[in-house]
Image: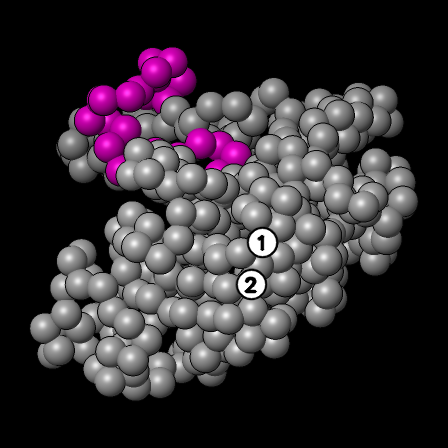
């Protein structure tokens, strides 16, 4: 009988990781113990993945509110600072905002609407229509926002993020003014010193601000790019990808982890003779159908991965073959025809109708989504994911 099981994704339990832990040894040991306990056989082209959180924790890559404040003050002058397009998140942004507020006398907080970049809604679309508000053109003051839309609570967290961020800034000793707009250049009516907090549109936002006359412009990826008073940092992504660690400290996105994935790959090859792929993963880039939230607050899905995870899938659409090329076949004849097509497929199917509908994303983004959903973000205790059969196809026996 042909093999009946395709891709399998397993969450692998691990000890709680602390700063200084030998993550290379821990990941390899956990995978080997899991394979022995379940059991399963380690095969070539299996994938070992670990969350970015345990990598950063092992590295001790943290920064305090005061560290952030010092960097903001040095880079933006410590007076009035525009903070534009932050995401609405207690975990992702609130501690960063606390540090920014401590590094300035006044914050002009400009929020995008009707939602933030990752889909957290401030305003229901129907409410915009009912009030004749055009988010592409209209700029709202806090007073006008409250007059039109009242106090909006996030559907999952129950938080009014406008009030929450306002109170947080004030608690840090800074004045605050809140504006709602979607053109980044609107902030220049209030200040020429700006931190733009958007993630995936940050290059365009910075370019527009500089072209419009901003004097000091920094993205979140340009704050905490070097140690401050012995803190952690991330040279490439700064505060992007950070998470709340305590009320006064953030865990930054991991740095310099390419060597780690290659070392784990080497260790498993030495122990088993099998060549596995290894990656570090963060947010998986998928959208919640109810809350409309994109799970994509990290700057990239995978900051480090082994060479075999480069590229995109090169796959045929089986239902297209069954319904078109081999519509007259059934049973074993259909199976054999489809297997032959897979074995003879071109090395590059881009633009060919037979691949229409296959997912046009990078392998690391696809596998990262699978890993993120497998490990979850709560109390499962499985920060390592072991995937088998991802690179198999219908011909594999």
Measuring from the top left, give residue 164's x and y in whole percent.
Answer: 50, 77
Residue 242 visible in image:
no
Local SS, label 1: loop
Task: Give residue 379's quadrant in the image.
Answer: bottom right
Magenta stretch containing residue 126, yes or no? no
Residue 345 higher or lower than 174, as above or below: above
**Mark 2 and mark 1 residues within 8 Å of each other at the beta carbon:** yes
Magenta part mainly helix, strand or loop? loop
Name the residue carrying label 1. Answer: 78
**Residue in front for this viewpoint, 393 or 45:** 45
The magenta span reads: 341-365
Residue at x-position 28% and y-position 72% = 141
Q: Which mark is residue 105?
A: 2
Measuring from the top left, give residue 106's x and y in whole percent.
Answer: 50, 64
Local SS, label 2: loop
Mark 1 Cα-neighbour bin, 10 Å: few <14, some 14–19, many ≥20? many
Residue at x-position 48% and y-position 57% = 80
């Amino acid at each position: 009988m042909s093999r009946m099981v395709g891709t399998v994704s397993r969450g692998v339990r691990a000890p709680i990781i602390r700063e200084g832990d030998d993550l290379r040894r821990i990941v390899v040991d956990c995978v080997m113990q899991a394979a022995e306990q379940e059991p399963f056989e380690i095969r070539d082209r299996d994938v070992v993945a670990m969350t970015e959180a345990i990598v950063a924790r092992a590295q001790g890559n943290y920064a305090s509110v005061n560290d952030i404040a010092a960097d903001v003050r040095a880079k933006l002058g410590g007076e009035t600072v525009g903070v534009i397009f932050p995401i609405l998140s207690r975990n992702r942004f609130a501690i960063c905002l606390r540090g920014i507020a401590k590094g300035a006398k006044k914050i002009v907080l400009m929020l995008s609407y009707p939602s933030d970049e990752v889909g957290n809604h401030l305003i229901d679309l129907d409410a915009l229509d009912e009030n004749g508000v055009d988010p592409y053109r209209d700029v709202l003051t806090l007073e006008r926002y409250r007059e039109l839309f009242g106090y909006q609570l996030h559907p999952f967290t129950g938080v009014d993020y406008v009030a929450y961020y306002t109170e947080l800034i004030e608690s840090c000793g800074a004045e605050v003014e809140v504006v709602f707009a979607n053109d980044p250049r609107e902030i220049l009516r209030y200040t020429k010193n700006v931190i733009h907090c958007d993630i995936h549109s940050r290059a365009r936002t910075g370019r527009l601000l500089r072209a419009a006359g901003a004097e000091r412009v920094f993205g979140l990826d340009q704050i905490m790019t070097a140690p401050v008073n012995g803190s952690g940092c991330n040279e490439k992504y700064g505060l992007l990808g950070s998470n709340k660690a305590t009320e006064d400290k953030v865990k930054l996105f991991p740095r310099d982890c390419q060597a780690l994935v290659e070392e784990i790959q080497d260790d498993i090859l030495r122990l088993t003779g099998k060549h596995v792929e290894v990656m570090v993963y963060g947010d998986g880039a998928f959208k919640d159908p109810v809350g409309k939230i994109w799970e994509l607050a990290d700057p990239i899905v995978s900051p480090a991965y082994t060479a075999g995870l480069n590229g995109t899938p090169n796959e045929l659409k089986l239902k297209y073959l069954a319904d078109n090329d081999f519509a007259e076949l059934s049973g074993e004849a259909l199976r054999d025809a489809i297997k032959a097509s897979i074995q003879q497929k071109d090395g590059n199917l881009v633009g060919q109708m037979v691949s229409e509908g296959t997912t046009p994303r990078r392998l690391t983004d696809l596998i990262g989504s699978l890993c993120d959903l497998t490990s979850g973000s709560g109390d499962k205790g499985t920060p390592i994911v072991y995937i088998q059969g991802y690179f198999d196809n219908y011909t594999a026996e």
